[in-house]
Image (spheres, helix red, strand yellow):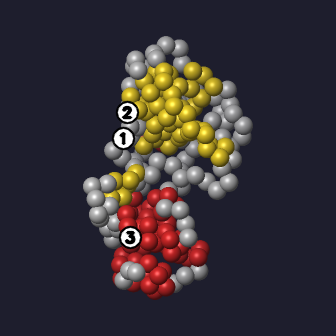
Amino acid sequence: MSETDLPLKPPLEVIAASLRAERVRAGLSLTEVARRAGLAKSTLSQLESGAGNPSLETLWALCVVLEIPFSRLLAAPRSAVQVIRAGQGPAVVSAEADYRATLLAASPPGTRRDIYSIAAEPGPQRSSAPHLPGVVEHVVIGTGRALVGTAEEPVELFPGDYISYPADVPHVFQALESGTTAVLVSEHP
């Protein structure tokens, strides 16, 4: 099993660790964060221990109090290559609607992202030379199948699958089915 096939940490575990770290970083007590977010102290304590089941709305309220982007609660430290299969990944649900949000990638501070729509057909792979140091690419497959990632370890992706990989090394995109589409986001430091 390669690192890209390892299971992701459960979202509640990531949220719990992130909440604790961000509260400590902000220099706020459990009581103060709970008060400002309109939550019971015991609820916040449960969330920080990984025992709670927060709604999207509760997490947004905590982000406002901690003055952090929502993605910071769901973004666990990641390896250089990350694959999220369709229907997997750190997701939270709304208490008010049939709505599920899955974080694919959080933008690091001070980065720029360019977004591309990709349409590709089977044939020779598209090989890319290394980009500038620190560039990371993110790809979500819309339709079809493709082999995507670093030239040394490309990953076969299906509709809805996500991958991120360092683009400052040789990397590839090869459509494996007719009508393959994807969204590519190039992240520049």
Amino acid on which the number 1 mark rests in the picture:
Ala
Measured Cα–Cα span from mark 2 to mark 3: 31 Å
Q: What amino acid is at disc 2?
A: Pro
Q: Give the residue pinned by disc 3.
A: 58
Count the labels in the image: 3
Q: Position of residue 143 (x, y in %)?
A: 38, 28
Q: Which residue is drawn at 65% across and 46% down?
A: 112
Which tag is nearer the camera, tag 2 or tag 3?
3
Q: How far apart are marks 3 and 1 (CA)?
A: 25 Å
| Residue designated by label 1 | 86
Q: In which quarter of the image is residue 116?
A: top right
| Three-letter amino acid code at the position of disc 3 | Thr
Label 1: few (<14), some (14–19) or many (≥20) C-alpha neighbours in 10 Å: some
Given contact means CB atoms under 8 Å apart, are the residues at marks 1 and 2 in contact? yes
In the image, residue 4 sits, relative to residue 179, either above or below, namely below
Image position, residue 24 (x, y; %): 56, 76
